[in-house]
Amino acid sequence: MAEEKKFTGYGTCKIANGEYTGELVSGVRQGYGVMTFSNRDIYDGDWDKGSMHGMGRFKFWNKEKERYTHSYKGQFNHGTREGKGKMEYSNHDVYQGTWQNDHRTGDGICWFADGCVFHGIWKFDQMIRGVFRKPDGELYDGELKDGKYNGYGKLFWPSGNWFEGIFVDNKPFKGMMFSLDGKISEFQEGKQL
């Protein structure tokens, strides 16, 4: 029985979950190509052995809004966002930095739609440690957990006063309070000592 020859070159083919136009090697997506998935998501970029690998752009289709609402442009590793990349979210947040297994992990900066900016270390989409700046000028440099100031850090208020020490759920817990006029006082659990 003769072996079936698979196409090598540039072409368009239907796949179980969509349609692909691009380079093929023995019928496998290899090189550059565009895949339109059955749910209308689109990947435009590099392929290796049939999976998204290298540089590319992925646009996410929102069925309810009937439009593309967020997109990722950057590196892929066999089907997952991995390496350096930029994600623009449907709520207008923008993250640029490192990714691991489809999660913001490593060094990255996020510009939030409300005007806040965080630059620092991420782990599985959570801010771990870095600088968080609010539009009113408040600046926090320290540890975070569950999106809040938790752990050791420094908080600078627009007034010029600042606190250094331990934070619990966005509030100074124990440490030192410094005022613009040069006063230094000990602070513990909501009381200046």
Image: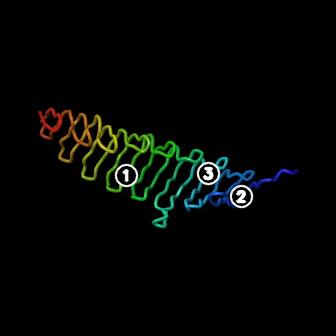
Asked if labels 2 and 3 touch by Cβ distance under 8 angstroms, the answer is no
**Residue 168 at x, y percent in the picture:** 26, 38
Three-letter code for the amino acid on which mark 2 is drawn: Tyr
Tell me which numbered mark, 1 or 2, is placed earlier along the sequence: 2
* In-image side of 118 versus 61 (left or right): left
Residue at point 17%, 46% (across, down):
159
Judging from the image, the colouring scheme is rainbow
User: Dot 3 surroundings within 10 Å: few (below 14), some, or many (20 or more)?
Assistant: many
Q: CA distance from mark 3 to mark 2?
A: 14 Å
Q: Nearer the viewer, residue 65 or 193?
A: 65
Instruction: Say which quarter of the image contains residue 187.
Output: top left
How dense is the environment of label 2, judged by Cα within 10 Å: few (below 14), some, or many (20 and up)? some
Q: Are marks 1 and 3 in contact (CB under 8 Å)?
A: no
Say which element carries label 2.
strand
Q: Mark 3 or mark 2: name the one nearer the start of the chain.
A: 2
Q: Return the residue at label 1.
A: 111
The residue carrying mark 3 is 46
Residue at far right of view:
1
Name the N-terminal-most of marks 1 and 3.
3
Q: Position of residue 138 (x, y in %)?
A: 25, 47
Question: What amino acid is at disc 1?
Answer: Trp
In this view, 114 is above or below 147: below
Outermost residue to the bottom:
66
Q: What element does badge 3 sit on? A: strand
Question: Circle 2 is placed at which residue position?
Answer: 10
Position of 103 relative to 10 (above/below): above
Residue 139 vertical position relative to residue 135 in the rendered view, above or below = above
Quadrant containing the C terminus in the rendered view: top left
> Any mark on residue 180, and which?
none
Residue at 39% of width from left, 58% of height from top? 91
